Amino acid sequence: MKDFNDDPHLDVCQNIEFYLMQCYRADPALTDALCEFALDNAKIAIKRQFGFAQNERVSSAPSVVPVVAAMVALGLERIDKDNGLNLRGFVARLDKIRASVRRHQQYGSRAYYQVVSDYFPANVRPL
């Protein structure tokens, strides 16, 4: 996949980040490590919606469930309906954001939130 600037589905990455910011704001216990775990679970959950990963489990941890639900809802809204985005492409965007969350963890337990929240004020809606 191309970098952020060349990504034809950059808006999907922005939507993922927007919904993650909502989850971070709603749950002070959501750390970057939990967010990373939730995004891993979201990949399984969205694959299950399309008939894959049926034998894999999705966590029901309180901080994980809202993230997974938001990512599945976004995936169902965008996959195969928007600009050629398929399941594989959506999962790749989840991986891209997950990698960013992981990179920021070294700077604090909610460092990703601190950095990205500047781009998503509480009153801004997604693209």
Image (cartoon, helix red, strand yellow):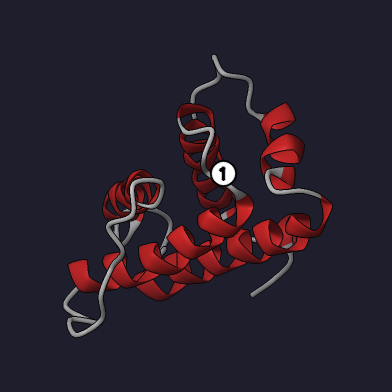
Mark 1: which secondary structure? helix
Q: Position of residue 55 (x, y in %)?
A: 19, 85
Residue 104 falls left or right of residue 62: right
Which sits in the foreground, 21 or 74?
21
Q: Residue furthest right?
A: 107
Relative to 13, residue 52 above or below: below
The three-letter amino acid code for the residue at tag 1 is Glu
Please tell me whether residue 113 is drawn above or below residue 88 in the rendered image: above
The N terminus, quarter of image = bottom right
Task: Out of 96 and 86, give the one closest to the viewer.
Answer: 96
Residue 100 found in image quarter: bottom right
Q: Give the answer, above or below, for where 7 lies relative to 74.
A: below
Residue furthest top as drawn: 123
The residue that appears at 63% across and 20% down in the rendered structure is 121
- Describe residue 30's horizontal placement relative to residue 46 as left or right: right
Which quarter of the figure has residue 114?
top right
Above or below residue 16? Residue 115 is: above
Q: How many marks?
A: 1
Position of residue 38 measured from the top left corner of the image (x, y, whole percent):
44, 59
Q: Is residue 8 visible?
A: no
**Residue depicted at x 55% and y 20%:** 124
The percent coordinates of residue 115 (x first, y second) are 76, 39
Residue depicted at 52% across the width and 71% down the height = 92
Q: In this orientation, which residue lies closer to the viewer: 126 or 67?
A: 67
Left or right of 36 in this view: 103: right
Q: Residues within 10 Å of mark 1 (few under 14, many from 20)?
A: many
Circle 1 residue: 17
Residue 11 visible in rendering = yes
Residue 88 location (% of width, % of height): 41, 75
